[in-house]
Image: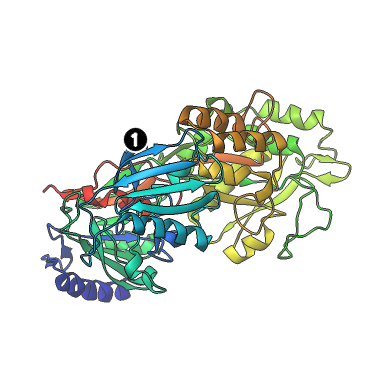
């Protein structure tokens, strides 16, 4: 978005905020001075829908809608719409009681029937909310809902913390663009590719938020920084490469995240096979475990974090570093001598002196693709490739479109990003039945009966402790696993901090650790934001 177009947008935005109760003011330099009950937030990613049954709020709080339970900043669970719940001894029936003082913003009371309707609708949608293990949800009375599962499922509460409750009486095909909920904020307006407006729900049972009017505007990283520099926005998501920019009147908050970047490495040889959509499968270099592990041990992650991210990040060793279910044994040290021995022991040698090892005439060389325009992924990939070259493996880095990535990711390495504050992601990344499907979870084709057994045990555990024990074994059980010490389908490199420009005098509260994705994780605690000066 150009700055000229953005200035026009802000004029429209000012009028919009005035219409929904805000009070934007004009500073002497022509910028928009902050109203003490309003914020303008610039982010790069526009949601596809505001319908929780279709994925709105996935991994975060949906803000327009209430959830049965929610996360604290320390990732513990606490009640939201629910006042309590019980679990049957066999782990199959969850029974929730819900509060009787919650109302949708159209004045209708929230009942157990709405909860049951939401869960059944989310299951039928078969979107990003996975409720395939739910048999049924039924209202027992106005404030009690029973949910029956087909098998014990330890991630059920994690899923519920993301599913906002929708009104059965007001749900239709256009709900995702015009939602009604019982959460801390009310939807006002959505202008696609431009902005979404929210206003505080003054009747929210948790208390009306201090920030009354919220405008979320969508723009690129460069445009967002320009908007900060001209004082047009109060908060802007940025990137590590821009985080050292000093802007008068703003400070940078680096929010810790599980948002990681690393190489996916195809594990199968090229045998001319394709996926269901016709994408080629297999890579004759990366299918060798010693190649994958040599890459993992050759990379100095701390150096990449400092050089590429300017300190706005940390080394990554798994998809869930620092989470309660992470296995600390997945951490590996940079050891290029060990990487060279791995290659030599497997018969790889630099026979022609060009610096690249080969075996049986096959050079240890392949391409890693990344989404063009993503400066962070490009920089991480190039820095890692430079280091890996020192052990005799050449990685050619190429920027392509996402459409191109979906066609090539089963046969070439990808600088991919994942990371979630919930353990569901581990299950989807490594389960055998998800390998080589036409989605982004397991394009490398990782399959393991041992891993599947740990995944199933983690999913079916009746306690958090038992689930976490098995999540850790997925990564490394002492002899095998999905981590870089094991089969190494991924080479994890860095975890990003989510770099955010915040206008001085605005508190964005205690931010929970962010999952993957710029934009939406930031607003999950929006009701805690406040102007302090």
Q: Nearer the viewer, residue 471 or 413?
A: 471
Q: Nearer the viewer, residue 248 or 500?
A: 500
Residue at screen point 23% across, 59% down: 103
Residue 528, relative to residue 327: is it above or below? below
Image quadrant where one finds the N terminus: bottom left
Residue at screen point 73% across, 60% down: 275
Residue 323, relative to residue 174: is it above or below? above
Total numbered badges shown on the rendered structure: 1
> Which residue sits furthest right?
360
Q: x and y percent of residue 208 in the render? A: 16, 54
Question: Which of the 4 quarters of the picture holds residue 47?
Answer: bottom left
Q: x and y percent of residue 115 in the render? A: 36, 55
In this orientation, does residue 219 appear?
yes
Quickly name the residue at label 1: 74
| Helix, strand or loop at mark 1 | loop
Q: x and y percent of residue 53 in the render? A: 43, 60
Q: x and y percent of residue 6 in the render? A: 30, 72
Residue 409, relative to residue 426: is it above or below? below
**Side (left or right) of 234 relative to 372:** left
**Side (left or right) of 84 relative to 21:** right
Q: Nearer the viewer, residue 419 or 331?
A: 419
> Which residue sits furthest top?
478
Residue at screen point 71% across, 42% down: 447
Residue at screen point 27% across, 58% down: 110
**Side (left or right) of 36 relative to 371:** left
Q: How has the structure been colored for display?
A: rainbow
In this orientation, does residue 193 appear?
no
**Side (left or right) of 226 relative to 49:** left
Q: Residues within 10 Å of mark 1 (few under 14, many from 20)?
A: few
């Amino acid at each position: 978005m150009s700055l000229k177009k953005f200035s026009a947008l802000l004029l429209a935005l000012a009028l919009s905020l005035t219409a929904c109760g805000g009070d934007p003011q004009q500073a002497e330099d022509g910028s928009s001075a902050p109203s003490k009950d309003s914020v303008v937030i610039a982010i790069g990613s526009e949601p596809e829908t505001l319908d929780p049954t279709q994925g709105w709020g996935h991994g975060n709080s949906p803000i327009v809608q209430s959830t049965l339970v929610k996360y604290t900043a320390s990732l513990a669970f606490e009640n939201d719409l629910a006042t309590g719940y019980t679990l049957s001894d066999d782990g199959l029936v969850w029974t929730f009681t819900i509060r009787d003082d919650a109302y949708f913003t159209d004045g209708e009371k929230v009942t157990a029937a709405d909860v049951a309707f939401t869960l059944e609708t989310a299951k039928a949608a078969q979107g990003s909310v996975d409720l395939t293990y739910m048999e049924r949800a039924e209202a027992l009375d106005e404030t009690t809902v029973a949910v029956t599962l087909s098998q014990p499922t330890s991630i059920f509460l994690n899923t519920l913390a993301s599913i906002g409750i929708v009104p059965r009486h007001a749900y239709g095909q256009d709900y995702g663009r015009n939602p009604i909920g019982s959460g801390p904020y009310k939807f006002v307006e959505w202008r696609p590719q431009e902005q979404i407006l929210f206003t505080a729900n003054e009747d929210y049972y948790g208390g009306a938020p201090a920030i009354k009017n919220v405008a979320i505007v969508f723009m690129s990283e460069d445009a967002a920084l320009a908007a900060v520099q001209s004082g047009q926005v109060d908060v802007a998501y940025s990137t590590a490469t821009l985080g050292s920019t000093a802007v008068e009147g703003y400070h940078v908050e680096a929010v810790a995240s599980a948002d990681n970047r690393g190489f996916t490495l195809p594990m199968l040889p090229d045998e001319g096979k394709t996926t269901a959509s016709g994408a080629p499968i297999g890579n004759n270099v990366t299918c060798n475990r010693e190649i994958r592990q040599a890459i993992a041990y050759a990379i100095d992650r701390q150096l990449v974090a400092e050089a590429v991210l300017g300190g706005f990040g940390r080394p990554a060793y798994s998809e869930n570093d620092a989470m309660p279910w992470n296995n600390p044994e997945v951490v590996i040290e940079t050891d290029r001598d060990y990487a060279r021995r791995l290659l030599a022991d497997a018969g790889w040698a630099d026979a022609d002196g060009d610096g690249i090892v080969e075996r049986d005439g096959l050079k240890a060389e392949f391409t890693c693709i990344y989404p063009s325009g993503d400066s962070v992924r490009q920089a991480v990939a190039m820095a890692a490739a430079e280091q890996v070259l020192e052990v005799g493996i050449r990685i050619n880095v190429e920027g392509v479109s996402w459409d191109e990535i979906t066609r090539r990711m089963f046969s070439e390495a990808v600088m991919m990003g994942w990371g979630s504050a919930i353990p569901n992601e581990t299950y989807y990344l490594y389960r055998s039945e998800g390998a080589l499907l036409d989605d982004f979870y397991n394009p490398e084709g990782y399959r393991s009966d041992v891993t599947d057994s740990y995944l199933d045990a983690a999913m079916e555990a009746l306690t958090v402790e038992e689930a976490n024990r098995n999540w850790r074994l997925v990564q490394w059980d002492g002899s095998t696993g999905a981590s870089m010490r094991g089969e190494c389908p991924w080479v994890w490199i860095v975890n990003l901090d989510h770099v955010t420009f915040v206008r001085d005098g605005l508190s964005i509260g205690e931010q929970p650790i962010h999952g993957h994705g710029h934009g939406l994780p930031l607003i999950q605690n929006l009701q805690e934001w406040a102007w302090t000066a």
